[in-house]
């Protein structure tokens, strides 16, 4: 781990998602969509490294991480709920295969939204969000991370689908070929995909069946 960073702010943005703000090492850089490894700088936890995505932008003076907590796992994310302002984290360098490569559709499942938060935030700052859409799958409405921001940025191009709750506002079920066709997914444009591996595998199959070429799909390698 190459850097030590200090926690400056902690807040809950949903019932199980933390937003962490830390200081930023001088000269540290990354591309929107990239991640790093973090470990908590405490005895017994320094070797427990986990990947987390930057949801701040490279030009920001601080680093931001948007982190889903899994208490049932009894692991590092659970320990993050015990962090205090002033605590330190150990951080590696930036890495990741997801970066912006052109106009298209973002498809996310749950915490898979995090690389797209930075990319969409960047496009919004540059006033270049037109022509993009986001399809976001969650279990229930309260699970939708950054819902208000995403709605403000994308408007009618923000499509939600919920697997465990029926509401009048959102579609019900899972993202599949039929749902993608209803959203008029354009297979001539880029498709960005991030979510649980089973979802990603199923959707890769659907997207290729719809005519998307492999070079148009941007996703972390599942191999």
Image: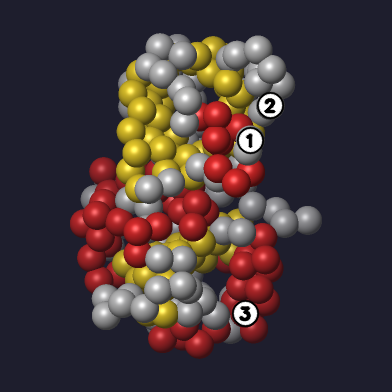
Q: Position of residue 194 (x, y in %)?
A: 55, 57
Tag on residue 56? Answer: none
Q: Secondary structure beneath disc 1?
A: loop
Vertical placement of residue 199 versus 49, above or below: below
Of labels 3 and 1, the one closer to you: 1
Question: What residue is shown at x 63% (from left), y 65% (from top)?
Answer: 200
- Residue at position x 41%, y 38% in the image: 18
Question: Is mark 1 in CB contact (under 8 Å) with mark 2?
Answer: yes
**Tag 1 residue:** 75
For marks 2 and 3 on the same chain, the one whose residue lies earlier in the sequence: 2
Task: Give left or right: position of 213 versus 163.
Answer: right
- Where is residue 212 drawn, in percent x and y? 59, 76
Badge 2 is on which residue? 48
Residue for badge 3: 206
Real-space Cα separation, disc 2 to disc 3, in angstroms: 36 Å
Q: Secondary structure at mark 3?
A: helix
Of the pair 70 and 106, the residue shown nearer to us: 70
Look at 26% across and 43% down and name the residue there: 125
Q: Position of residue 169 (x, y in %)?
A: 27, 76
């Amino acid at each position: 781990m190459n850097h030590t960073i200090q926690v400056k702010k902690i807040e809950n943005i949903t019932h199980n998602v933390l937003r962490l703000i830390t200081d930023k090492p001088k000269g540290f850089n990354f591309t929107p969509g990239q991640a790093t490894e973090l470990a908590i700088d405490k005895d017994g936890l320094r070797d427990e490294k986990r990947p987390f995505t930057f949801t701040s932008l490279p030009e920001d003076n601080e680093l931001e991480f948007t982190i889903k907590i899994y208490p049932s796992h009894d692991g590092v994310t659970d320990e993050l709920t015990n962090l205090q302002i002033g605590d330190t984290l150990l951080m590696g360098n930036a890495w990741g295969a997801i970066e912006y490569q052109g106009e298209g559709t973002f498809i996310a499942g749950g915490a898979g939204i995090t690389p797209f938060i930075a990319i969409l935030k960047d496009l919004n700052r540059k006033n270049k969000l037109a022509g993009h859409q986001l399809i976001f799958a969650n279990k229930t409405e309260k699970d939708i991370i950054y819902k208000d921001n995403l709605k403000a940025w994308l408007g009618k191009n923000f499509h939600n689908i919920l697997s465990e709750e029926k509401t009048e506002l959102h579609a019900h079920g899972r993202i599949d070929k039929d749902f993608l066709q209803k959203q008029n997914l354009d297979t001539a444009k880029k498709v960005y995909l991030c979510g649980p591996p089973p979802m990603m595998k199923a959707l890769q199959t659907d997207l290729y069946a719809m005519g998307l070429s492999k070079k148009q799909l941007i996703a972390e390698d599942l191999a």
